[in-house]
Amino acid sequence: MKEGPDIARVAALLGDPARANMLTALMGGRALTATELAQEAGVTPQTASSHLAKLEAGMIVTPRKQGRHRYFTLSGPDIVEALEVLMGIANRVGHNRVRTGPKDPELRHARVCYDHLAGDMGVALFEGLTKRNLIESDLNDVALTAAGITFAGEFGIDLDALRRKRRPLCRECLDWSARQSHLAGSFGAALLDRFYDLGWARRVAESRIVRFSREGERQFRDLVNF
């Protein structure tokens, strides 16, 4: 392709196995050091630094300095969405990791995708909000309905504050494990934060897993009529 965006360069940056492991680790939304990312990738710190330099130059990751430490985050939620799509393709065509473990069912059930809820629970949230006519979607857009705006306020979410952020309020994200949509955007992130605040769920330490309590899952299912 002689014109337009250079997808080959981006694909090359994402396609290296070590870099892919680093980026997957950053999908949890937390900033990580080069040492931590080296451990995730299974490479030496020197090799990790070389990979991170390429990802930084390609604007895939963003460095942040705090004190003596340098942390890295994904440069934007669109990187997360691209990774989710690639993971979905890999899962569909059978290119899965050889090693699986007891965490895999929990990751598929409920996990963080950058800053919003993914997995079966994330898909149930998207479907439930749609069925309750709180959000509406087509092939190009997801938006809160009038009923959804009322619901957000009643559920303790400040939409005016969310609208001041430089990101879409609602966005559809294709879930790699369920191969259906879950809700991204600032509203999707705010919903997950609200679940934490209400004590319905908690983030498992050093993991992307979101674990709902028995009562929290019951409240969640009532919310989405699931």
Image (cartoon, rainbow, N blue to C red):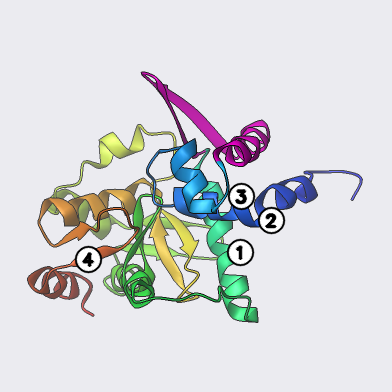
Residue to which mark 3 is pinned:
19
Can you give x and y, in whole percent of width and height, for residue 131 in the image? 31, 75
Give the number of the disc on residue 211. 4
Residue to which mark 1 is pinned:
86
Identity of the residue drawn at 53% across and 32% down = 62
Question: Hey, which quadrant is residue 155 in on the image?
Answer: bottom left
Instruction: Name the amino acid type tagged 1.
Output: Leu
Question: Does residue 89 show up magenta in the picture?
Answer: no
Instruction: Name the amino acid type tagged 4.
Output: Arg
Q: Is mark 2 on a helix, strand or loop?
A: helix
Q: What element carries label 1?
A: helix
* Label 4 vs 3, first from the N-terminus: 3
* Label 1 vs 2, first from the N-terminus: 2
Can you give x and y, in whole percent of width and height, for residue 72 in the image? 48, 35
Instruction: Name the amino acid type tagged 3.
Output: Arg
Question: Does residue 73 show up magenta in the picture?
Answer: yes
Disc 4 versus disc 3: nearer the observer: 3
Classify mark 4: residues with Cα within 10 Å, few (<14), some (14-19) or many (20+).
some
